[in-house]
Image (spheres, rainbow, N blue to C red):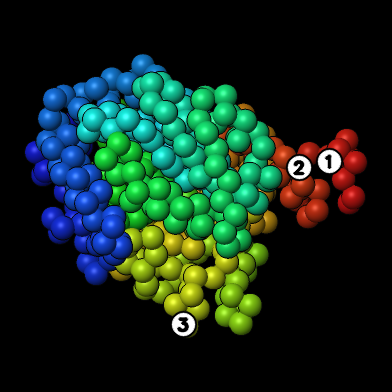
Amino acid sequence: MSGNHAGADRADAGDGTFGGYGGQYVPEALMPAIEELTDAYERYVLGNEDGFVDEFRGRMADFGGRPTPLQRADRLSERYGRDVYLKREDLVHGGAHKLNNALGQVLLAKYMGKERIVAETGAGQHGTATAMAAAHLGMPCEVYMGERDINRQRPNVFRMRLNGADVTPVTTGRGTLKEAISETMRDWATNVEDTHYVIGSVVGPHPFPSMVRDFQALISEEARGQAEGKEGRLPDAVLACAGGGSNTMGAFHHFVGDEDVDLYAVEAGGSSLDVDEDEGVAPNSASLSTGSEGVLHGARTKLLQDRHGQIVESHSVSSGLDYAGVGPELAHLVDEERVTPVTVDDDAAVEAFHRLSQEEGIIPALETAHAFGYLHEHHDELGEFVVVNVSGRGDKDLESVIEETSRRDVPNAPDMDVFGGDR
Ligand SMILES: *Cc1c(COP(=O)(O)O)cnc(C)c1O
């Protein structure tokens, strides 16, 4: 959506596949919805029909607070001996990049004549962004959320309720994100005439991965111009954390054609990179680095799965990275060796969280902290001019950081005694 709305921006093969990844692996009942959405994506998002893209950009400016700054991090630049810049998506309304996508999709639903929004949420960040966007645009909104997640994320549940959304508990399976996605797809298939499903990352069947990437690509469109304005050139490296991969694809998209810009997708290494197939668990969420090809939620992509193709339970200290799949375009860019997948473990992410807070006065999301963990460990390999995408702010994570910091030895943490931790 780089100001050229005529489809020249398409990175897929025209059919929603990226190499062998992507596609539309959905039940028959969902195909009418998918076809209608594909048509709307091509007309409004790629074609700017009825001025859709102009209205999207206008609302992201006035309601969302865009453009976000590209800020030089002076202390980190000094510490690492190179220019470190921060793309401040934490300053987007709601505190993360997620509104870029949520607002884009709710607005698209309006243009399509839909009267109701459904969404799924894990930790509640995407549900919160969708509820905000729906309230802003006057659309009723229902958010499916695993029962276990509802109990773990009460503030986010209340935020969604404050914005007028209904939060529907999902009790099947483990009661987490995976089951919430399946339930939302069922609702969508049943109510397709009046309902749009706002998916939360660059995942799911085509056109979602391309469409969500286009909404998030505002990040790299701005960053590219800002880099040229501030340093007179493009960065040597761009770093972004990758869960489903939406802030990553957003931060990378307009640099993909610039061979000299190295792109790093930083995944959650969790507590270890091993998978215990017998237990069906992976103590990490590193699907790009350690996953294998399979189909999840309507798309072929890289997944954490056992040898029978069963999805294994992932883990990360940051709930937003805790997903067994990843966007198909990102999986393809990794196979093409255009994007380098790397991992940062829980301990390093918690340390990086404290470092950015202390040295730059920015409390990052735990997801974002992974990107700074990689910068800390590998700055020597990153060239003279590095951009880190600050996908979100850390206010939502304070409870878990108190807990995570209290039960491990974090050399650079403030004294935790005041919380009566059991160290
Ligand atoms: C949700 C979230 C992520 C992970 O989602 P992606 O689709 O991989 O971007 C990363 N950072 C923050 C702050 C989030 O809220």
Q: What residue type is labelled 3?
A: His
Q: What residue type is labelled 2?
A: Ile
- Image quarter where the N terminus lies is top left
Determine the residue positioned at 60% across, 54% down: 171
Are the residues at dot 2 and dot 3 in contact (C-beta closer than 8 Å)? no
Asked whether 86 or 14 is in front, the reply is 14
At a point 58% along the width and 62% down the height, the residue shown is 173
Q: What residue did someone put label 1 on?
A: 416
Q: Identify the image quadrant of residue 78.
A: top right
Circles 2 and 1 in contact, beta carbons < 8 Å: yes
Packing grade of label 1 (10 A; few <14, some 14-19, many >=20) is some
* Near-viewer residue (261 or 52): 52
Residue matched to label 3: 308
Give the residue type at disc 1: Met
Residue 333 in the image: state x and y as whole percent.
29, 61
Q: What residue would you read off at disc 2? A: 402
x, y percentage for residue 258? 23, 49
Q: Distance between the residues labelled 2 and 3?
A: 38 Å
Q: Position of residue 34 (x, y in %)?
A: 24, 51
Q: Which of 148 and 231 is in front in this view?
A: 148
- Residue 379, compared with residue 155, is above or below; it is below
